[in-house]
C-alpha cells in the first residue's frame, strides 16, 4: 500500500467515520439513559430516510423542513412506542428487546409492500466534489461532518445543560431517588425514546441522498452503531465520537489494503477481543 | 384430571408418530424442522434461566452442522459419531467463548454473542476449501445411523422425533434436579446465590455449554436433512428467532420454549411463500409480548381467569342497573 | 402443571389448521400446475416479480386460446408461486411444498443458491426444473431434468469479443461482484474469458451484499488504473452505488454487466450522466423489435407498469409450452427429452437448448442474446449475439 493510497484511505476513513458517528448517536442515548439496546434503531433510520423520500423528493418540500418533519414524526413514534410497548411491559429489559426486535421485523417486512420493491433514491442536496489531499470527496459526504457535529453538540447541550437532561441523568443514576425528587419518570422515559428515535431518523434522513433507499437499509447502520458504542463505551458521547472515527478508519484502511471481506471479519474479531479484555470500551463506565 | 392429561398426551404422541402416514412428505418436512426448532429453543433455556441473554445460539448450530456434514461427506463417518462430534465441537467452541465472556453482565454478554454469530458466519464464508463458502456445502450424505442409511424423509422424521424427545428428557431431568435450582437461583439473585457458596461462573458455563451441545445436535440433524449448508442461514436472524421462541412461549416453565417453537414455526406454514409471512409472524410476536408477557404458556391460565371473572361479575349487580 | 395444557392445545390447534390440506394432485381435472419459487419480496424482488408475472401472462394468453392440447385433450395452465425471499430455508421449504403438497411436477426456481440447495429434491423426485440462476455446476449431467432458461456467463461473455473489436483502446479490466457463489462463478468465467482475449486483469473484488459504501474498495481498485469495471452479478442497487462512488472518486471509464440489471434503477441512483456508456446484457429499453414491443404492451396492460426484466424471463414459460407440445405428454422425463430437441420462439428470436460441448449435457438455453449500451440514461440495443457454444 503506497503512502499516497494510505493518505487517501485515511481521508475516506474519516468521512466514513463521521457517518458512523451519526448512526451511533441515537443508540448511545437510549442505552445511556435507559439501558436499552434499541434493536429498532435500524428500522427507524430507514423510516427517517423514507420520510425524506416522500416529503422532500416526492412532495417537493425544502430539504431542511423535510428533515425536521422527519425527526418530529419519528420522535412522536418513539414516544408512542414507549407508552404502548415499553411501559406496559413494566420496563423489563429483555422483553423490551424482544418487542423491539419484533417491531423491527415488522417494519422491514411491511416496507416492501408499502414502499415498493425497487430501490429508491433521493436526489442530492449538495452537488460537486472537492479534492482533499489527493482524493476526491463529494460535497454531500463532507457536509455530514458539520451536520453530525451539530447534532452531537445539540445532544450534549441537552443532556448537560437542560432541566430535562438533568432529569434523565438523575433517572439513569437512581430511578427511585429521582422520582422522590419529583421527576416524572414516565414522561422522561417517553422523551428519551422520542429523542433516541428522532436521532435515528435524523441519521437516516441525512444519509438518504448519499446512498440508496430500501426497507432493509437500516441493518448495516444498526450493526455499525452497536460496534461503535461498544468501542466507545455504552452511553458515552465522546466515546461514540472516538469509536465512530476509529471504526471508520479501520474499515477504510483495512478494506483498501486487504479487500472488503477480510476487513469485515477483522472488525468483528476486534470487537470480541475488546469486549473480553476491556468491556467498558474506551470511555464507558461499568454497568449497574 | 390426571387421566385426561395422560390421555391427551398419548393421543398427541400417536399423532406425532403417524405424521408420515397422515401427512405425507410435506408434513414430514415441516414437522422435522419444527422438532429441530424445539431442540434449539429448549437448549437455550438453561442459559436464559441463568440470566444470560444469549443471542448467538445459531452459531453453535452452525458449528455442529458443518462438523457433522464434513465428517460424513469427506470421511464417511456414520451419523451417530458425526453428530456427537459436531455437538462436542459446538460445546468446546462454547467453552472457548463462554469462559472469558461469562463474567460479562447482561448487555455486554449479549453483544459478544451477537458479534460471535457474525464471526462464525464469516469463518464459514471465508474458509472456502473446507466449507465451500458461499457456494454452499452440498452433497451431504443422508443420515447413516448404526449402519442403516435413513433414505426416506419419513425415517429421518423419526430420527428428529427421537432426538427431540431425548434432548427434552435430558434437559427436563437437569432442570428438575438440584442443578436446575441452582441455575434458577443464579438467574434470580446471583449475588445471593454466590454468598451461599454457589460457584456462579462454573454453573453459568455449564448451562451455556450444555446449550451449545444440543444446538450442535440440532445442527447435525439439519445438515443431514436439508443436505445443503449456506453460511448466512445461521445468522443473526435465526439466533433472534430462537430467542423469540423462548420469550413468546414463556420463560417461566420448561414447556415454554417447546410451545413457542412449535407455535411460531407452525404459524408460518400457512403463510409459507406469501409476501405477508414475515409481517404476520412479527405481529404475532408483538401481540404475544404485549398481551401475554409471561408467554403463551400463561394463556390457559389467563383464559381461566377470564372465565372466573365473567362468572364472578355475573353474580354481582351491574352498576348500570 | 398448566403449561402442559398449552403444549397440548398448541399441537391440537396446529393439527387442526394443517391437516385439512392433504397433498394435492398436479393434474386435477384439466389443469397443469406449474410451480414457481422466486423472491417476491426482499432485495431480489426486482427479479422475482417479473419472473412470476411473465410466466402468468404467457399462460393466461394460452388459456385464452383454449389451453394447451395434449393427446387431443385441452389443458389449462396454472401458476403456483411462492416467495422464498432468497433465504435457503424458505427456498427448500417452498420447493418441498410445491412437490410434496401441491403435487407439482414442473417448476421454475430463481436464485443460484436456492436452486443448488434444491438440486437433490428436484432430482430425487424427477421434477422438471427450468431455473433462472447463476450457479456453477447447475447445468450438468447430474441434473438431467434441469434446463437453465437464461444465458449465464459462459454464454454472455462472448460480448467481450465485440468490445475488443469496436473499442480496442480498452485494455485493463477490474471486477467487483457480490461475495457468493453467483459472484465467484461469474467472475471466474468472465476473467478466464477476457484473459484469453488478451485483456489484463486490474483487480478482483468481492463485497458483502449489504455493503453500501464502496469507497475503500474502489480506492483499492482504482489504484490499479482499470479502463473498464465489470459489475457482473451485482444487483441494481449496488451497481448504482458503485458507479456513483466511482465517479466521485474520479473514475472516467465504462462499466459492464453481462448478467442482467435494470439500468433505469441504476441510473436513478448513480445519476444519469454517470451511467453513460455502460454496457449490459438482457435489458433493453429501445429500440424494441416488434415482438418485444407487443410484449411490452400486453405486459403493461395486465400489470399496470412495464418491467423490461420480464423480457428475458419469459423463457421458462415458452420453453415449457413448446416442449410439452412436442412431447404430447405430461411425464417430466418425456418433456425433458423433447426439451433437448425442440426449437421455439422467444422474444429475441429462435431458441433451443444446447451447450453439450461446454457443459456435458445440452441443457442450457441458446438464443441471440441482446446487449445494450446506456445512452442518455436509456438502455439502447447495440447488438444481438449467439453464444460461442451451440
Image (spheres, rainbow, N blue to C red):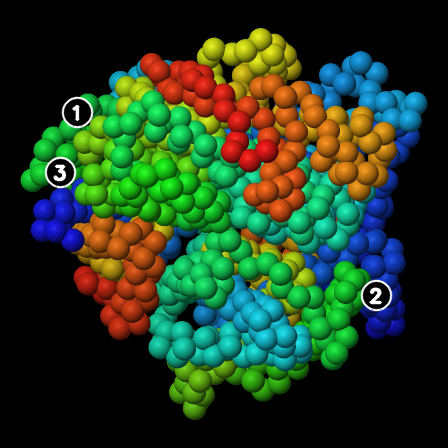
Picture quarter with the N terminus of chain B: bottom right
**For this view, does C335 lie left or right of residue B49?**
right
Residue under pointer 1: A128
Residue under pointer 3: A135
Residue C168: name its quadrant: top left
The answer for which chain carries disc 2 is B
Residue C160, above or below B211? above
Tell me the distance, in whole angstroms, between the alpha carbons under discs 3 and 2. 67 Å
Q: Residues within 10 Å of mark 2 (few under 14, many from 20)?
A: some
Q: Nearer the viewer, residue A2 or A145?
A: A2
Q: List x then y, in percent, for residue B184.
A: 53, 77
Residue occupying image coordinates x 66% and y 75%: B79
Tell me the distance, in whole angstroms, between the alpha carbons under discs 1 and 2. 69 Å
Residue A111, above or below C84? above
Q: Which mark is residue B17?
A: 2
The answer for which chain carries disc 3 is A
The answer for which chain carries disc 1 is A
Q: Nearer the viewer, residue B273 or A169?
A: B273
| Earlier-in-chain disc, 1 versus 3 | 1
Q: Nearer the viewer, mark 3 or mark 2?
A: 3
Q: List x then y, in percent, for residue B54.
A: 47, 66
Element carrying mark 3: strand
Residue occupying image coordinates x 53% and y 20%: C307
Q: List x then y, in percent, for residue B188.
A: 48, 74
Element carrying mark 2: helix
Q: Nearer the viewer, mark 1 or mark 2?
A: 1
Residue C248: name its quadrant: top left
Q: Nearer the viewer, residue B31 or B44?
A: B31
**For this view, does C335 lie left or right of residue A229?**
right
Tell me the distance, in whole angstroms, between the alpha carbons under discs 1 and 3. 13 Å
Q: Which mark is residue C346?
A: none
Amino acid at each position: 500500500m503506497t503512502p499516497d493510497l494510505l493518505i487517501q484511505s485515511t481521508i475516506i476513513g474519516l468521512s466514513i467515520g463521521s457517518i458512523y458517528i451519526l448512526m451511533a448517536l441515537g443508540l448511545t442515548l437510549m442505552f445511556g439513559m435507559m439501558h436499552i439496546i434499541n434493536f429498532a434503531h435500524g428500522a427507524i433510520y430507514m423510516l427517517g430516510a423514507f420520510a425524506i423520500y416522500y416529503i422532500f423528493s416526492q412532495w417537493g418540500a425544502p430539504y431542511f423542513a423535510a428533515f425536521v418533519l422527519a425527526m418530529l414524526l419519528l420522535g412522536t413514534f418513539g414516544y408512542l412506542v414507549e407508552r404502548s410497548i415499553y411501559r406496559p411491559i413494566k420496563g423489563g429489559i429483555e422483553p423490551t428487546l424482544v418487542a423491539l426486535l419484533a417491531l423491527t421485523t415488522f417494519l422491514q417486512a411491511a416496507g416492501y409492500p408499502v414502499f415498493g420493491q425497487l430501490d429508491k433514491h433521493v436526489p442530492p442536496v449538495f452537488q460537486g466534489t472537492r479534492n482533499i489531499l489527493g482524493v476526491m470527496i463529494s460535497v454531500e459526504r463532507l457536509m455530514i461532518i458539520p451536520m453530525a457535529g451539530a447534532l452531537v453538540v445539540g445532544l450534549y447541550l441537552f443532556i448537560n445543560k437542560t432541566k430535562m437532561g438533568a432529569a434523565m441523568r438523575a433517572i439513569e443514576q437512581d430511578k427511585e431517588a429521582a422520582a422522590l425528587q419529583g421527576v416524572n419518570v414516565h414522561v422522561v422515559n417517553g422523551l428519551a425514546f422520542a429523542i433516541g428515535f428522532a436521532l435515528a431518523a435524523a441519521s437516516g434522513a441525512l444519509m438518504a441522498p448519499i446512498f440508496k433507499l430500501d426497507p432493509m437499509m437500516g441493518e448495516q447502520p444498526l450493526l455499525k452503531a452497536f460496534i461503535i458504542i461498544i468501542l466507545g463505551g455504552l452511553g458515552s458521547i465522546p466515546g461514540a465520537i472516538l469509536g465512530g472515527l476509529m471504526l471508520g478508519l479501520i474499515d477504510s484502511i483495512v478494506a483498501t489494503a486487504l479487500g472488503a471481506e477480510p476487513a469485515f471479519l477483522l472488525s468483528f474479531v476486534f470487537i470480541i477481543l475488546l469486549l473480553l479484555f476491556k468491556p467498558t470500551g474506551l470511555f464507558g463506565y461499568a454497568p449497574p | 384430571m390426571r387421566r385426561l392429561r395422560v390421555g391427551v398426551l398419548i393421543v398427541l404422541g400417536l399423532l406425532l408418530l403417524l405424521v408420515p402416514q397422515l401427512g405425507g412428505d410435506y408434513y414430514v418436512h415441516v414437522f422435522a424442522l419444527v422438532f429441530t426448532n424445539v431442540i434449539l429453543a429448549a437448549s437455550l433455556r438453561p442459559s436464559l434461566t441463568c440470566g444470560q441473554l444469549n443471542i448467538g445460539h445459531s452459531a453453535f448450530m452452525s458449528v455442529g452442522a458443518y462438523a457433522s456434514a464434513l465428517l460424513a461427506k469427506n470421511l464417511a463417518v456414520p451419523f451417530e459419531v458425526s453428530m456427537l462430534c459436531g455437538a462436542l465441537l459446538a460445546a468446546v467452541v462454547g467453552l472457548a467463548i463462554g469462559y472469558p465472556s461469562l463474567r460479562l453482565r447482561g448487555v455486554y454478554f449479549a453483544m459478544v454473542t451477537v458479534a460471535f454469530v457474525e464471526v462464525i458466519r464469516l469463518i464459514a464464508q471465508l474458509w472456502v476449501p473446507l466449507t465451500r463458502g458461499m457456494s454452499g456445502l452440498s452433497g451431504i450424505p443422508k443420515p447413516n445411523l448404526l449402519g442403516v442409511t435413513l433414505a426416506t424423509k419419513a425415517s429421518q422424521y423419526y430420527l428428529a422425533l427421537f432426538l427431540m424427545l431425548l434432548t427434552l428428557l435430558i434437559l427436563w431431568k437437569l432442570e428438575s434436579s438440584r442443578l436446575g435450582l441452582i441455575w434458577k437461583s443464579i438467574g434470580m439473585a446471583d449475588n445471593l446465590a454466590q454468598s451461599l457458596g454457589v460457584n456462579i461462573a462454573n454453573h453459568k458455563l455449564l448451562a451455556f455449554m450444555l446449550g451449545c451441545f444440543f444446538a450442535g445436535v440440532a445442527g447435525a440433524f439439519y445438515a443431514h436433512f436439508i443436505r445443503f449448508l449456506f453460511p448466512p442461514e445461521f445468522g443473526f436472524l435465526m439466533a433472534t428467532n430462537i430467542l423469540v421462541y423462548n420469550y413468546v412461549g414463556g420463560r417461566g416453565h420448561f414447556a415454554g420454549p417447546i410451545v413457542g417453537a412449535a407455535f411460531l414455526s407452525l404459524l408460518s406454514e400457512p403463510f409459507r411463500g406469501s409476501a405477508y409471512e414475515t409481517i404476520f409472524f412479527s405481529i404475532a410476536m408483538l401481540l404475544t409480548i404485549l398481551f401475554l408477557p409471561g408467554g403463551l404458556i400463561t394463556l390457559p391460565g389467563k383464559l381461566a381467569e377470564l372465565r372466573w371473572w365473567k362468572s364472578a361479575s355475573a353474580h354481582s349487580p351491574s352498576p348500570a342497573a | 402443571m398448566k403449561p402442559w395444557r398449552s403444549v397440548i392445545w398448541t399441537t391440537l390447534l396446529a393439527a387442526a389448521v394443517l391437516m385439512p390440506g392433504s397433498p394435492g394432485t398436479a393434474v386435477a381435472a384439466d389443469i397443469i400446475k406449474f410451480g414457481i419459487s422466486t423472491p417476491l419480496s426482499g432485495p431480489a424482488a426486482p427479479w422475482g416479480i417479473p419472473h412470476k408475472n411473465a410466466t402468468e401472462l404467457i399462460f393466461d394468453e394460452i388459456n385464452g386460446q383454449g389451453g394447451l392440447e395434449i393427446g387431443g385433450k385441452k389443458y389449462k395452465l396454472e401458476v403456483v408461486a411462492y416467495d422464498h425471499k432468497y433465504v435457503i430455508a424458505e427456498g427448500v421449504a417452498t420447493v418441498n411444498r410445491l412437490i410434496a403438497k401441491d403435487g407439482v411436477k414442473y417448476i421454475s426456481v430463481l436464485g443460484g443458491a436456492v436452486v443448488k440447495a434444491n438440486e437433490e429434491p428436484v432430482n430425487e423426485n424427477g421434477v422438471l426444473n427450468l431455473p433462472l440462476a447463476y450457479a456453477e455446476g447447475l447445468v450438468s449431467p447430474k441434473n438431467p431434468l434441469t434446463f437453465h432458461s437464461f444465458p449465464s456467463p459462459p454464454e454472455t461473455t462472448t460480448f467481450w469479443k465485440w468490445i475488443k473489436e469496436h473499442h480496442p483502446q480498452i485494455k485493463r479490466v477490474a471486477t467487483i461482484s457480490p461475495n457468493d457463489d453467483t459472484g465467484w462463478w461469474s467472475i471466474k468465467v468472465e476473467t478466464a474469458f477476457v484473459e484469453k482475449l488478451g485483456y489484463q486483469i486490474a483487480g478482483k473484488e468481492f463485497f458483502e451484499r449489504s455493503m453500501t459504501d464502496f469507497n475503500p474498495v474502489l480506492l483499492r481498485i482504482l489504484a490499479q488504473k482499470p479502463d473498464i469495471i465489470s459489475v457482473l452479478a451485482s444487483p441494481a442497487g449496488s451497481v448504482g452505488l458503485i458507479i456513483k462512488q466511482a465517479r466521485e472518486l474520479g473514475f472516467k471509464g465504462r462499466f459492464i454487466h453481462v448478467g442482467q440489471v435494470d439500468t433505469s434503477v441504476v441510473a436513478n441512483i448513480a445519476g444519469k450522466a454517470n451511467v453513460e456508456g455502460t454496457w449490459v446484457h438482457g435489458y433493453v429499453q429501445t429500440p424494441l423489435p416488434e415482438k418485444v414491443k407487443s410484449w411490452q404492451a400486453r405486459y403493461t396492460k395486465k400489470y399496470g407498469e412495464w418491467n423490461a426484466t420480464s423480457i428475458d424471463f419469459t423463457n421458462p414459460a415458452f420453453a415449457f409450452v413448446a416442449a410439452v407440445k412436442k412431447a404430447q405428454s405430461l411425464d417430466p422425463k418425456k418433456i425433458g427429452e423433447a426439451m433437448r430437441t425442440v426449437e421455439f420462439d422467444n422474444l429475441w428470436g429462435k431458441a433451443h437448448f444446447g451447450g453439450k460441448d461446454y457443459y456435458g449435457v445440452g441443457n442450457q438455453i441458446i438464443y441471440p442474446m441482446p446487449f445494450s449500451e446506456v445512452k442518455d440514461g436509456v438502455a439502447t440495443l447495440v447488438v444481438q449475439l449467439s453464444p460461442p457454444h451451440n
